[in-house]
Image (cartoon, helix red, strand yellow):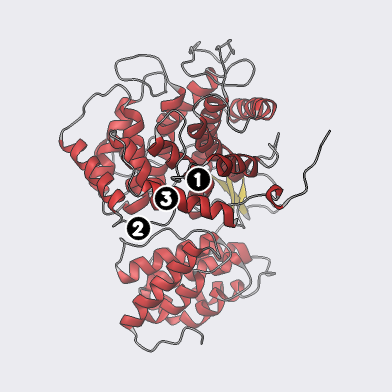
Amino acid sequence: MLLFRCSSTDAALTPESPEVKAAVKRGTDFLATASDQRFGGSSLVALALYKSGADEDHPQVQRAVNDIRNYIAKGPHGQRDEMYSLSLSLILLAEVDSEGYASEISWLLERILADQKSHGAWGYINESGGDTSQTQYGVLAIWTAVQAGYVVPDEVWKSVMGWMIRTQDYSGGFAYHPFDPGTYVREIQGNSTNSLTSAAMGSLYVCLDYFNNAGRKAHDPTVPSALHSANGEAKRVGTGFDRKRLFGALTDGNRWTLEHFDVAPGTYHHYYMYAFERYQSFKEASGNTEFPVADWYSRIARHLLDSQSDQGSWQSRCGAACDTAFSVLFLIRSTRKSLTEAGRFGSGVLVGGRGIPSGDGEFVVQMGRVVARPHKGPADELLGMMDDPNHPEYLQALRGFEELAAEGDVELLDKHAARLHRLAHGSDAEARLAAVTALARTRNLDNVPTLIYALSDPDPRVATAANDGLKEISRRTRGVGPLGENGSDLRAAAIEHWKQWYLVVRPGTDFDK
């Protein structure tokens, strides 16, 4: 019996593998002319194209934007399964330009929150029961809104998290339309599937990420008044939920997944693959390594490469356009890209209190994250401490300088520009992040070459801060695609974009100096 094959095709695949990139290219070429009659379908197609490197002006992106605006103009339709379309549309607009589409995002977010059922889940309109499939998209949409600066009340998160934990099958899996027992005593829910277990597990990890990492303020002034507290200030994130119960559900779900993993189970193969990538990406971001599924990306990617049609498409049950979009989103690891851009894979912050340093009052836990207590002092003193990563108050100085920079004293920051430039080129990621953030706040064109240099930083938080700063300085918030992974074609294109812009502003600039 042949147990092993020794060939190049068995090498582990990654999103950067040439054959994966080629498959993505064929898939996006197909999507460039594909159509789906549902406005959520056009949003899904546009999302896959945009996350793969298309810009806002791509015809499919513009088509999706127009479909969304037409839907909004006609008012709520009450379509039975509109949660999919509402959620995917919000995700697309927030990814492309959360500032430019603020009014549309606010409308969609209010509609999504209004559609949440009393038990916490989302589901079919005019039906009381919860739907695990639709709930996953509601959860992903509100998480995306939070990353864009919108406020989603804690109770929304606690409610949906409670529903998912209560409806978990006694085996650890999840079903399509589970029965909510109203207590946390597990019931037999029926047929647990890979697709729906991935959907629910991904959603539980999204909730955990929210409570660990959520933004602190509303997207003022566009946040609907219903999402503010009575005194007009944005509500802040809380942590009043049972972490032990959540972690128990995650452990059982991870165990079920390892025991039942399949590359293409059931009939909704490609829908499942995107859900599984999301689940694994949020699990990875949480630091949870229990019950790992070995080589899951490579195994599923190999199946996709072997099953792609001559036209570049894939199809199972959702139609060629949507199934191809799901497949592309899986292959490029779109969720991990979003988490990377949100700073979830950076260094320097301890999550969940694990490994908390010793020292009386030197560190505090904020939103489940261990951070240094800010050192109060003048900029000169703080920068002096930041020059030496071995200084006993190094992390406290970083936090203190971050607070100082946030106050936006441009004259003060300009005064220390030379030291900030040096720190931005230094070996410590935390110092580089603080320096790049401060340089961006000055909006001084002299700092642009350093910010462009920082786009190639190996720490995604630094590169994202530099990109955001360049957008602020140039006042270009539109037409700039995603950064992508360091060293990727997307990152190289972003760097070249900003260089060409700066050469128009400052002709003759030598970026090699």
Q: Which of marks 2 and 3 is nearer the N terminus?
A: 3
Residue under circle 2? 55
* For residue 340, above or below residue 144: below
Calculate the distance from the C-alpha at mark 2 to the C-alpha at mark 3: 13 Å
Mark 3 and mark 1 residues within 8 Å of each other at the beta carbon:
no
Q: What element carries label 2?
A: loop
Calculate the distance from the C-alpha at mark 1 to the C-alpha at mark 2: 18 Å
Between marks 3 and 1 in the image, the one whose residue lies nearer the viewer: 3
- Classify mark 3: residues with Cα within 10 Å, few (<14), some (14-19) or many (20+): many
* 462 with respect to 475 (left or right): right
- Quarter of the rendering containing residue 382: bottom right
Residue type of the residue flagged with mark 2: Asp
* For residue 181, above or below residue 35: above
Provide residue 424's location: percent of width, then percent of height.
54, 74
Q: What residue is drawn where x is 38% and y is 56%? A: 54
Q: Which of marks 3 and 1 is nearer the N terminus?
A: 3
Provide residue 162's location: percent of width, then percent of height.
50, 23
Calculate the distance from the C-alpha at mark 3 to the C-alpha at mark 1: 17 Å
Between marks 1 and 2 in the image, the one whose residue lies nearer the viewer: 2
Residue under circle 3? 28
Residue under circle 1? 335
- Quadrant of the image containing the N terminus: top right
